[in-house]
Structures are given as structure tokens and as C-alpha cells.
Amino acid sequence: MALQSFLQVFFLALISFLFLYRLMRNKNGCPKSSPGIVELLLNVHRFHDWCTETLESCKGTCFLESPWFAKMNWVMTCDPANAHYVMSSNFVNFPKGPEFKQMFDALGDGIFNSDMDLWKNQRIAAQGFMRRHLFHQFLLRTIRDKVEMGLMPIIDHAAKHGSVINLEDIFQRFTFDSACILVTGYDPSCLSLGLPQVLFSKVVHDSEQAIFYRYVRPRSFTKLQKWLNIGLEGTYKKAWKVVDDVLAEYICQKRKEVNKLNQELVSEDGVDILTSYITEKESTGLNCDDKFLRDTALNMIIAATDTTSTALTWFTWLVSKHPIVENKIIEELESKIPIGETKRRRLFNVDEVKNLVYLHGALCEALRLYPPVPFNHKEPVKPDILPSGHPVHPKTKILFSVYSMGRMKSIWGEDCYEFKPERWINERGEIKHEPSYKFLSFGAGPRICLGKETSFIQMKAVASALIYNYRIHVMEETPVVPAVSVVLHTENGLMTRISKRWE
């Protein structure tokens, strides 16, 4: 405890020193055009909004100044031209880089962390598995079952008893269960009436805060916490052993299960991603040992869990604040129901909701304003100059603020802060597709999100079931604000009271 207090005092002293350093660098004491580490540290609690304000004043791109010992060489940007250049047209010169792998070290050599041939081979294999008709049927069945037998009973129970429930937690349980089934074939069943605690999911959620602070604190402070095994870094290290133990058990059981499988059983029941890697390791050209399977399973579970649940959280909150949008979604859903069957409880199948224009637009609008992964970074292999004119070198971290990009008037117009699903509908009443380097919620270029379509299927299934069948009232006394994390969770959850729309 004394050591923790000492470190907090040390950190405050460091901020004070950096402030004096900045004033000394700027003799007249006036603010400089580029932000510095002092401003960053003082605005950590509102990091994403600070990035937006800073980038707005800097016309979309700026350097972050820091003294030599901080080793924080950043270029912050939300310029679509820079995004297109780095993520698409000059992709080869901008891999994730070694520092990215250090930040997300728990992910090992999985697809999220890897570069070059290792990344390429993993992407080809994963894409091949996910595009199979058999997997698609497995996906649809899993989502349908989880909505009908997992989500709806919990919502019905809350509505019946007038309980206040945290919908963000419910969405995380839904996506975690679904992801585990699709990736490993096992259902942890955390989406059940008792709402049991699942350490795996909690560890991942808590670790995302530790990773965020690796970005905004000087590297020396992070190394000190690691060495002393205290603070966020100490918790992070201990927590991942829980995840490793769970995944080791999954992999061990899966190998035993695969040895007993025959081809007829596989073709009838569908196959999860882990089984595909084990049974087809020769065709993938990958070393499918236990470590590879651990890294692959973890990367896919995290990618499928946090992004979709976070998107659903912000979407639900935004719709609850815009009753006109809610009514338009209900009207669009009713247009797919046979005459005489409206105004009653209903679950929609994928074919009924996949082409709904207004619902799709509302989801895209929520993703624009509240992207689940609010920032991303790249590092150049060789010195380069961005389209904005900013030079970068191999030790430069190029930080893309996806959150800020959705709030730039120069990109989305004067009404960029408004929630307007109509923004995504063209004059013919069809979905309007924006370039990925302008709408970065799913990434862009060769590394664009593999699970984009899967995510939309899940979101539409959950959104249609909730909005059509229930009225959702968000509790005003619990502010809905972004948390300090690498994923845009809420700070306090989405506390709601729910009632049935139809009796």
C-alpha cells in the first residue's frame, strides 16, 4: 500500500516536471500548436473527447510532443487520406509493428498481433473457414438459439419483476457465449438467469483498461509496475493465467473430441473454428500446436465479444434517446410481418432483417459516433511522409482516432454530432456505402475486419428482438459515458428498466 502511494506521488511529480519542461520549451508561456504529454496526462479521463478537440483544432493531424525520456513519439490523426495511405495504398510500409505486439502481448501470435506472412496465412485460413456454408448455418443456429433461449428469458424475467438490469452486461454475456460456441464449440452459459460470473470474460474486460494505460503513460512507468508486479500491470499478469488455464482445457478436450469424430458427424452438426484448425492443419500450412490454437482462439473470442456487445450498448442507448428513430425501426420491422400477425411477440429470422435499410443505417450511425475500437495505431518500417505532410519514421506511432473521425465536420458535415440513420440512406432509399477509410469502425484495407458480416447478423438479431418486443427505459441517474479503455465500454454500464411492448 505504501509503495502504491509512493508511485502515485511520483507520477504527480512527473506530470509537474513535464509541465515545467513544456513552459521552458515555450519561452513566452503560450500554448504551442502541437499538444504535449502534459495535456494528454491531464485529459486521460476524457481521452477520446480530448483527441477530438485537439484534432479539430489541428485540422485532422498533429504531433504529440514529449521529452526524450518519455519515448512517446506520436502522430495523431483522423484524416481519411492518411488512413487510406497507411491502411491501403502503402499498406506494406505500415505493419502493426513490434510495439503493438508489446502492448497486446497477451494475444501472442494471433491474427490481431501478427504481421507479414504469419498474418497473411492466418487470415487466409480463417477467411476460408468462415465462408463455408456449413459454418454459416452453424452461426445462424447459434445466434437464433442464444436470442430465443438465452437473451429473451432474461429480458422477460426483468420485465416481469420490474428489475433494473445492466444491458451492457447482458450483451457481453450474449456475445461471449456465442463467440465461445463458434470458436471452440463449448458454451460457457454465462447468459442464464442466475447471471453467473465468468472469470474469463471479466479478465479480458479488466485487462483492456491496463492496455489503455500502456498507451498514455511513459513506457518507463509501465515497466516499473511490471517489475514490481503491482498496480494495473500486476493485476494484468495474474489475471491472464485464468484465461490460459481455461483455453488449455478447451484445447485439450477439443483434441480428444476430434480424435473420436467421424466425417459424417462433422457434416451434420457443423464445425467450430478450433476443430477446423485441428482437422485441417496440413491444408492451412500453419503450425497448429497448442500455443497457436490458444492464440487463435483468444484473438477470435475477444474480437467477436467486445466489439459487438459494445456496439449494441451504444446503439440501444442512442435509440432510447431518439423515439422517432425507434418508431421508424418498428415500422420497418412490421413491414416484414404478414398482415394479421403484427402487434404480438415475434423473433425475426436473418432473412427478414438482413436487408432492412433503416435498421442498418441506425447501426452504422451508432458505430460512427461510438466505434467499439476507438483508436488504432501503426508504425512505419521506413521513413515516410503522410498525405497530410507529416513526416514519420520507424519509431513513430501513428495513432488513428476512429472516435474523432466520426465527429469531424470536415468529414461528416455540420450535423456530425447528431444521430441520423438517414445519413446512411441514398436518394433511392437504399443503403449508402461509405469508404472504409472514412468509416473506420471495421478497419480498412487488407486488414479490414473478417467478422464484419457476422457482427451485423448478430446486431440485427438482437436489436430486432429487443426493439420490437420491449420498451427500454434508460435510468437517468446512472450517466452513460465512455470508460477509460482500449474498447469503448461505458463507465457505469447501461442500466435500464424494461417492459413488454405486447402482452
Image (spheres, rainbow, N blue to C red):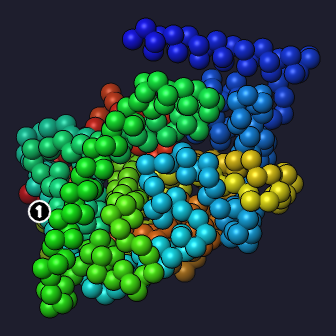
Q: In the picture, residue 206 is in which quadrant? A: top left
Q: Which residue is mark 1?
A: 149
Could you tell me the amino acid type at mark 1?
Answer: Met
Residue drawn at (78%, 30%) of the image: 68
- Residue 428 in percent (x, y) is at 55, 80
Q: Is residue 308 left or right of residue 389?
A: left
Tell which of 244 and 345 is nearer to you: 244
Compared to 483, does 88 lie above or below? below
Q: Measured from the top left, where is residue 270 in percent x and y?
A: 21, 81
Q: Nearer the viewer, residue 326 or 170?
A: 170
Q: Is residue 214 above or below residue 314?
A: above
Residue reaching furthest to the bottom: 264
Q: Is residue 486 left or right of residue 234?
A: right
Q: Quadrant of the N terminus?
A: top left
Q: Quadrant of residue 150?
A: bottom left
Q: Residue at x 28, y 37 (%)?
A: 495
- Helix, strand, or loop for circle 1? helix
What residue appears at the point 56 percent right and 10 percent down from the top-left corner?
9
Q: Is residue 262 visible?
A: yes
Q: Horizontal and vertical percent for residue 119?
A: 54, 69
Image vertical order of residue 3 relative to residue 35, above or below: above
Q: Quadrant of the C terminus?
A: bottom left
User: Would residue 26 be found to the left or right of residue 448 on screen?
Assistant: right
Which one is nearer the viewer's eye here, 466 or 229?
Answer: 229
Q: Quadrant of residue 446?
A: bottom right
In the picture, measured across the screen, residue 198 lies left or right of residue 19, that is left
> Is any atom of residue 467 visible in this view?
no
User: Few, some or many C-alpha atoms within 10 Å of disc 1 (few <14, some 14-19, many ≥20)?
Assistant: few
Tag count: 1
Return the residue found at the far right.
27
Query: Residue 480: where, in percent of width, then height?
Result: 40, 36
